[in-house]
Image (cartoon, rainbow, N blue to C red):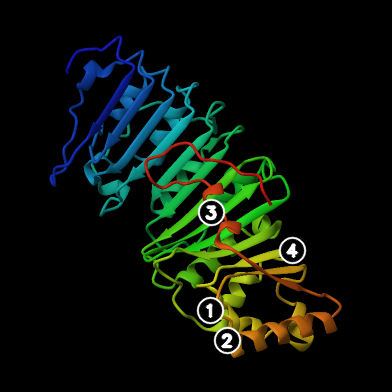
């Protein structure tokens, strides 16, 4: 395949080998002018920027689990995006290099980027990797009609201002805004959904302290989190969040100053009980000040849990910020209403039910 494929429109390649396969520089003769879909999984293609110079009709580009040998600098990727006016779906998952960019033999070919690239057709963007790579890339691109964004981080997040700018600078989140924190065995997900259908998913992989990690993400996304009106705390059927001290849970709740409805699933409730027990007296409204309805998933109410609920309700009532408690079923959480990435699906079902 070392000659141009002028009629090729769809190409999907996946490696199941433990070695790191790579495509040569003259793959497809360095030209595929009719290509609309390019999917590479576990395959390195260092010369990809050169090929992208000819794929001006490209609609879908997904690079999954790209080995280190195929690492491409974020600035080069951003420069290539300028030449893809029809690109609608983008997925990037680069393995991080073991050394600095200055020491690596990476392909820096491709167009230079004098100004921020505007991806006028991009509606779906999914990323997996280290946070600094995404930050460097997002600093160089805009996507005015983006509808779905997911970011899966393999490292500890410290600062993600570009993610906030990229997803919210144009005020694309329209109220009411719903958020869900979902705990799984080895990761924790924060999902936002706007009333106009825009979706953002932030995933922390391999997180030992899940609640603390997500509290940090919420602080980084404070301008968005502070506008959330409904918050769901959910855990899948086979796991529950690791127990942690009350202060960390309160750190997680603190940015949600506009939440009016709080949904807590049955397997999360035991961990939420201790921090709620502390919200009494003058501190009753320091956390979740706008909360009006607390929805509890189906669970066997112990005497301790019942006393916690009653004391919380009493404290809020005495502070003139009453809260009503209602019980709900698992279907009320409706996690499928959010973007289903990561997986290998590109389209999310949207359910505007509040």
Residue 271's disc is: 1
Residues 110 and 329: in front is 329
- Residue assigned mark 3: 335
Asked which secondary structure carries label 1, the reply is helix
- Residue assigned mark 4: 260
Q: CA distance from mark 1 to mark 2?
A: 14 Å
Sort mark 1 into few (<14), some (14-19) or many (20+) by Cα contacts within 10 Å: some
- Residue assigned mark 2: 302
Q: CA distance from mark 3 to mark 2?
A: 27 Å
Report the quarter where the N terminus lies: top left
Residue at point 59%, 85% (across, down): 274
Q: CA distance from mark 3 to mark 1?
A: 20 Å
**Residue 210: quadrant of the picture:** bottom left
Q: Choose the circle earlier in sequence order: 2 or 4.
A: 4
**Residue 334: quadrant of the picture:** bottom right
Asked which secondary structure carries label 3, the reply is helix
Residue at point 45%, 28% (across, down): 81
User: Taking 65 as reference, is 235 above or below it?
Assistant: below
**For the residues carrying marks 3 and 1, which lies nearer the camera in this image?**
3
**For the residues carrying marks 1 and 2, which lies nearer the camera in this image?**
2
Q: Are marks 1 and 2 in contact (CB under 8 Å)?
A: no
The location of residue 41, given as percent across then percent down, is 27, 38
| Horizontal arrangement in the rendering, residue 202 relative to residue 64 (left or right) | right
Q: Choose the circle earlier in sequence order: 1 or 4.
A: 4
Q: Choose the circle earlier in sequence order: 3 or 1.
A: 1
Q: Are marks 3 and 1 in contact (CB under 8 Å)?
A: no
Residues 339 and 203: in front is 339
Residue 306's disc is: none
**For the residues carrying marks 3 and 2, which lies nearer the camera in this image?**
2
């Amino acid at each position: 395949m070392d000659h141009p494929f002028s009629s090729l429109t769809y190409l999907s390649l996946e490696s199941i080998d433990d070695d790191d396969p790579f495509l040569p520089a003259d793959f497809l003769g360095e030209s595929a002018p009719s290509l609309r879909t390019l999917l590479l999984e576990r395959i390195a293609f260092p010369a990809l920027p050169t090929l992208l110079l000819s794929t001006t009709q490209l609609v879908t580009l997904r690079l999954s689990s790209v080995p280190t040998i195929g690492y491409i600098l974020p600035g080069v990727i951003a420069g290539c995006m300028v030449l893809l006016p029809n690109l609608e779906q983008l997925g990037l998952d680069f393995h991080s290099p073991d050394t600095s960019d200055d020491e690596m033999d990476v392909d820096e070919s491709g167009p230079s980027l004098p100004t921020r690239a505007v991806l006028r057709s991009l509606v779906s963007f999914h990323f997996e990797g280290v946070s600094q790579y995404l930050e460097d890339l997002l600093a160089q691109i805009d996507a005015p009609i983006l509808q779905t964004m997911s970011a899966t981080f393999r490292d500890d997040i410290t600062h993600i201002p570009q993610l906030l700018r990229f997803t919210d600078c144009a005020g694309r989140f329209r109220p009411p805004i719903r958020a869900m924190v979902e705990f799984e065995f080895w990761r924790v997900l924060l999902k936002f959904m706007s009333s106009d259908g825009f979706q953002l998913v932030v995933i922390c992989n391999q997180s030992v302290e899940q609640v603390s990690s997500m509290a940090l993400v919420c602080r980084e996304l404070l301008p968005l989190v502070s506008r959330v009106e409904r918050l769901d705390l959910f855990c899948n059927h086979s796991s529950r969040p690791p127990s942690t001290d009350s202060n960390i849970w309160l750190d997680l709740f603190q940015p949600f100053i506009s939440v009016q409805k709080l949904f807590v699933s049955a397997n999360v409730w035991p961990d939420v009980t201790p921090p709620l027990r502390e919200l009494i007296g003058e501190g009753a409204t320091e956390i979740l000040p706008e909360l009006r309805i607390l929805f509890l998933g189906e669970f066997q109410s112990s005497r301790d849990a019942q006393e916690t609920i009653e004391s919380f309700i009493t404290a809020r009532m005495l502070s003139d910020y009453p809260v009503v408690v209602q019980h709900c079923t698992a279907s009320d959480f409706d996690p499928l209403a959010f973007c289903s990435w990561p997986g290998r699906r590109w389209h999310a079902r949207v359910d505007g039910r509040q």
